[in-house]
Image (tube, rainbow, N blue to C red):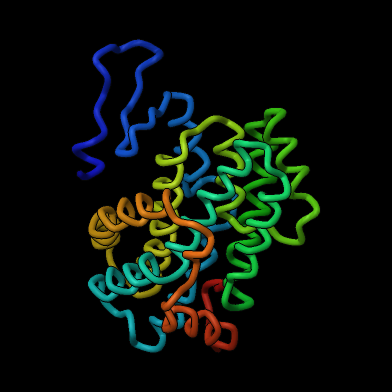
Amino acid sequence: MTMATSIRTATTRTATTMLETPAGQAVSPAALQRLLAWLSPSFPVGAFSYSHGLEWAIEDGTVVTAADLVAWLGDVLRHGAGRNDAIVFVHAYAAAATGDDDGLRAVAELAAAFQPSKERRLESCAQGAAFLMAVTATWPNPRLAALSETLAAEPAVPYPIAVAVAAAAHDVPLAPALIACLNAFVANIVSAGVRAIPIGQTDGQRTIAALSPLIEEIAASSLHASLDDLGGASFRADIASMKHETQYTRLFRS
C-alpha cells in the first residue's frame, strides 16, 4: 500500500480533521503543521551545506546522472544511514515518550558512535544541535524542555534523535514523523545533487518520487527493528565521506 492510496481525508471538514497513515496512526492538523515546519528546507539547521559524501562521488564520476543519484541514494537508504537513522529514531521516540531518560541518552550516544567519518558526524550532530536550539526557541513546551535537558549532558545529539525527541514531546505520531524525517534526509541530498552534478529541478523531484516507496518500506521495517539490527554495508558512501575530507575543491561540508 502506498502513501498516496493510504492517506485519506476524513469525512468531516472541521478543525479536528484527521489523516490516516499506513501504520494506523492519526495525524492532527497541528501535528502535520509541525512536521511541515520542522522538516522544511527553511528550518535553520544548515542542511543545505551538507552532501553526505555525494560531492566526492560526483567528483569521482560515480554519480553523474539522475539515474545514478537514484541508485546511490537507494543504497544509502537500504544499507546505510537511512536505515540506521530510522532505527535510532524509533528507539529515541519510544524512550522520550515513556520518560526513559537513561535509554534516550544511550540511544543518542549509540547514534553518534555509528557515524563512520568525521564529516558524517559533523553533518548529523551539527544539524541535531541546530534543530534542538531552533525547535525549543520556536515550538517550546515543558516536555521538550525536559527532554532537551536530558540530552544536554551528551557531547553530541544526532539529527534523527533531535527530531524524534521533538515529535514525542509534541505528540506527533511516530510513523508519519519517521517518514517525514527520512523524506527530508533524501530531499536534502537530492538538493545537493541538483546543484553539484548538476541535474534539473524536475529530475531532482523525479528522484525523490522514485525513492518514495523505499522510504515507506524502510520506515515500516524500522518500526519493529531492535538496536541489534543496526549496521551498514554502504561502504562506497562511507568511503566517499572520508575522501571528501581532503577533496581539493568543495561546495559542501560533507
Which sits in the foreground, 157 or 233?
233
Which sits in the foreground, 128 or 41?
128
Work out whether residue 89 can be spotted.
yes
Say above or below: 115 vs 244. above
- Residue appearing at x 44%, y 78% in the figure: 237
Q: Quadrant of the N terminus?
A: top left
Say above or below: 195 vs 97. below
- Residue appearing at x 68%, y 28% in the figure: 141
Which sits in the foreground, 210 or 203?
210
Q: Where in the figure is residue 140, as x and y percent of width and height?
A: 67, 31
Q: Where in the figure is residue 239, as x and y percent of width and height?
A: 49, 85
Q: Quadrant of the C terminus?
A: bottom right
- Would residue 20 be found to the left or right of residue 79 on screen? left
Q: Where in the figure is residue 104, as x and y percent of width and height?
A: 66, 49
- Residue appearing at x 53%, y 67% in the figure: 50
Q: Where in the figure is residue 80, as x and y percent of width and height?
A: 44, 70
- Residue appearing at x 59%, y 52% in the figure: 161
Work out whether residue 201 can be spotted.
no
